[in-house]
Image (cartoon, grey):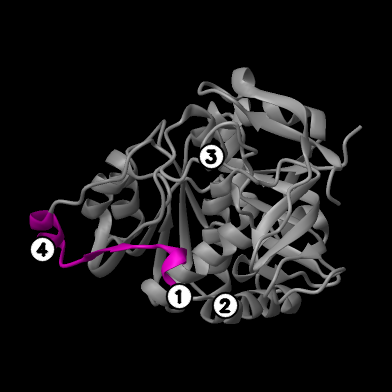
Amino acid sequence: MAGETMHAWQVGRTGEPGDVLERVQRPVPEPGEGEALVRVAAAGLGLPDVFMCRGTYAFSPPRPFVPGQEMCGTVVAAGADCDLAVGQRVMGVTAFYNGHGGLAEYCIAPDFSLYPVPDEMEDTEAAAFTIPCHTAWVGLVLRAGLSAGEVLLVHGAAGGTGAAGIRLGLALGADVIAVVGGAEKAATAREAGAQHVIDHRGKDFVAAVLELTGGRGADVVYDPVGGETFERSVDCTASGGRLLAVGFASGRWGAADSGRLVARNCAALGVYVGAHDHSELLECHHRLCELRAAGTLSPSPAQAVAFHEIGAALQRLGGRSVPGKLVADLNPE
């Protein structure tokens, strides 16, 4: 495909997504050693893409670059020592950190970050599956050891990461409390299956969690929000509980006070999928797909946006006005 060009969304300067994302023609990239060139069918949109536009993401590549961390597509070329076959349908994480993200007709992805797509799974679901679901598995299963009958508190429960936490928590037999901001997001959390929903705009979530649990608190807190939300969550974590630092949608990581952790007799744990090797994540991927096939793990619905709407969609996402997960159709009009 040398010499060919493709439609892509490119970031050439820092700012809000609606201002700095430009639809351009770029050369189709070539895969390097251990990499695949993937024809993108659908791409997940997430807050990291917004942060990359703003220049505040730790793994932002040099400009100009194509953002887009997660996608589903078909392998069209393989570099040296790449274990993937041409024609294989895959989902996973792109080489966005090198500027070849998924918001383009073609992207580059390392073979260790790609996973098989079940035949019955739609492109839009697969594009939003890997990062949220793998993160939920690492957090709830590998780090927290969530057991059936335990109480799981999920912050940011209307977003893609939070919704995956709800769905996997339910599949593992937990009693799920969701925290959201606003009535529309509360409805989204209920649709995901949360048994209890707290709107933090109308009620203090710490007091509400303690009330729901008879003063005991949640056994596991799954927090993609960070900042003050993480810090205050110590006060509604049960004795022996696990407070999971999953993300920083608030703009900063939380800093748990060790004295309060001791007083509550609970632990703060970091959740980093990248710390686990591909074989371990491939096993978790198979387990997740088995739960989904059995109907135990319900699919996460995604809102599809057209290729030409990507800039505006990321702008809305950055304004925290989008419940659920956004996925872009990468078939240019």
The residue pinned by badge 4 equals: 262
Mark 3: give few (<14), some (14-19) or many (20+) Cα within 10 Å: some
Q: Are marks 2 and 1 in contact (CB under 8 Å)?
A: yes
Give the Cα distance between marks 3 and 4.
Answer: 33 Å
Q: Quadrant of residue 150?
A: bottom left
The residue pinned by badge 1 equals: 141
What secondary structure is found at the residue carrying circle 1? helix
The residue pinned by badge 3 equals: 47
Which region of the structure is painted magenta?
A: 258-276
Give the Cα distance between marks 1 and 4.
Answer: 23 Å
Amino acid type at mark 4: Val
Q: Please identify the residue farthest to the top as the structure is shown.
A: 19
Amino acid type at mark 1: Val
* Residue 9 in picture, x, y percent from top left: 71, 32
Give the Cα distance between marks 2 and 3.
Answer: 24 Å
* Residue 214 in picture, x, y percent from top left: 29, 60
Amino acid type at mark 3: Leu
Mark earlier in primary sequence (3, 4)? 3
Residue 284 image label: 2
